[in-house]
Image (spheres, helix red, strand yellow):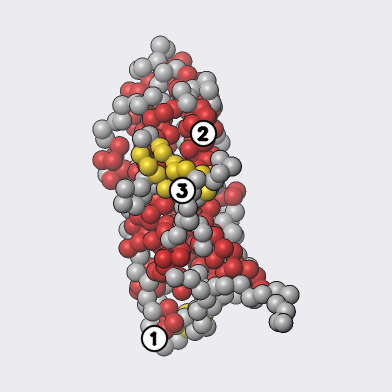
Amino acid sequence: MSVAPATAPERVTFTSAELLESGSYEAPLIAGGVRCHGGFEDDGGYRSPRMLHRGPAIEAWQSQLRSEGQSLVEIPKALMPPQYPNVDQAKLLLRHGVRDPIVRTLTIISIVEGFGAIIRDVKVPALHELVVEPVEGTSLAHLDKGLFEAHARDESGYRDEGGHKQMWEAARDVALENPKIPGDVLLRMMGGGGPGQRRKVERPFPQLDQTLERMIQMMARVCVVEVFAEGTFDWGEQVLSDAEVSAAPEAAGTMVRHIRADEKPHVEYLRTGLSELRARTLRTVDGKTIAGKTVVDGMLHNMLHEMTRSRPRDQREDLRGSLAEAMEAAADPAALLEEFDSLESVWTPPATTGFEPSSEAA
Ligand SMILES: [Fe+2]
Ligand SMILES: [Fe+2]
């Protein structure tokens, strides 16, 4: 008779089919008449989609990193800019019958969620050629074998199953009773100034293979966006679950909580992959090498520095562009604007990101 070792080695290699497998549910999640991903256990608890193996896999890759003495990248919560309008401002507007700005914000959230599908188009280069140390049995080796695809499906839905895009639309529509959606939301996001605006992509590390550089940059960007989204989703949950301003506080609040639960693995696999790269050495196109830490920290620093400054400004400008017009729905627009402004959050981005390039680096 053989005795299992005290700590059996955890499984670290999975097929894409496994990383996309949800398992079976007792009941499906229906949002706004749309069958969505995820579902309910027999005790009524919600279980996120595609987590049957993805959940244990991420945990195994993280514990592998820790056992190698490596740390996991952590984006400090203090860097998360406040939502504009904040919770109090949003509730104030709704109490005065000014719904457009909130409908607009919620619609932007749902559109941004749908955009998340682009993660499946990120090209993964031959990592075993570009990374000095082995990558077998890491999350990096699974990015194009289920992880990016699972993420894309979670955000925008898959086949006849809705994802976060549809779940946010459902939360908005039950809470605000099928509001009229401003026709220019997408247009303004794509135009100048809006949060969906794409800034010029530069090459922070031109010595890297460009596909590798783009992949790491995308992972760093999406990781930061996902962490910052926690603040936005908390805002959504607080506003939509308030019975004073929401027609369906229970249903809408619960829907946002399901979405938030689904987001956890996104942050976790991305920070695991970034941490694995950070613990390794990358080959440059001129036959030299560069520490993964220099690249990952450099990209995170740039991203955090830029987004902690641009995001509050973009959100504020976008909202204020149509605020005066929206406030005409109120009995006394001038008094409302004054009260709205008195509730504004004062926030200054922290001076450091925690990912500053170290001074000894040449
Ligand atoms: Fe999402
Ligand atoms: Fe996400």
Label 3 Cα crowd, 10 Å radius (few <14 / some 14-19 / many 20+)? many
Q: Is mark 3 within 8 Å of ligand 1?
A: no
**Badge 2 or badge 3: first in the primary sequence:** 3
Q: Residue 233 at x, y = what percent?
A: 50, 41
Give the number of the mark in front: 2 or 3: 3
User: Farthest top residue?
Assistant: 331
Q: Is mark 2 within 8 Å of ligand 1?
A: no
Residue at horizontal 35 percent and vertical 65 percent from the top: 122
Residue at horizontal 46 percent and vertical 48 percent from the top: 38
Indicate which disc residue 286 carries. Answer: 1
The residue identified by callout 2 is 253
- Determine whether the residue tagged by mark 3 lies in a helix, strand or loop: strand
**Amino acid carrying mark 1 in the image:** Asp
**Badge 2 or badge 1: first in the primary sequence:** 2
Instruction: Inspect this view and state whether residue 323 appears.
Output: no
Residue at horizontal 54 percent and vertical 66 percent from the top: 57
Give the vertical position of 92 relative to 28 (above or below): above
Instruction: Inspect this view and state whether residue 104 appears.
Output: yes
- Determine whether the residue tagged by mark 2 lies in a helix, strand or loop: helix
**Amino acid carrying mark 3 in the image:** Gly
Give the vertical position of 294 relative to 199 (above or below): below
The residue identified by callout 3 is 38
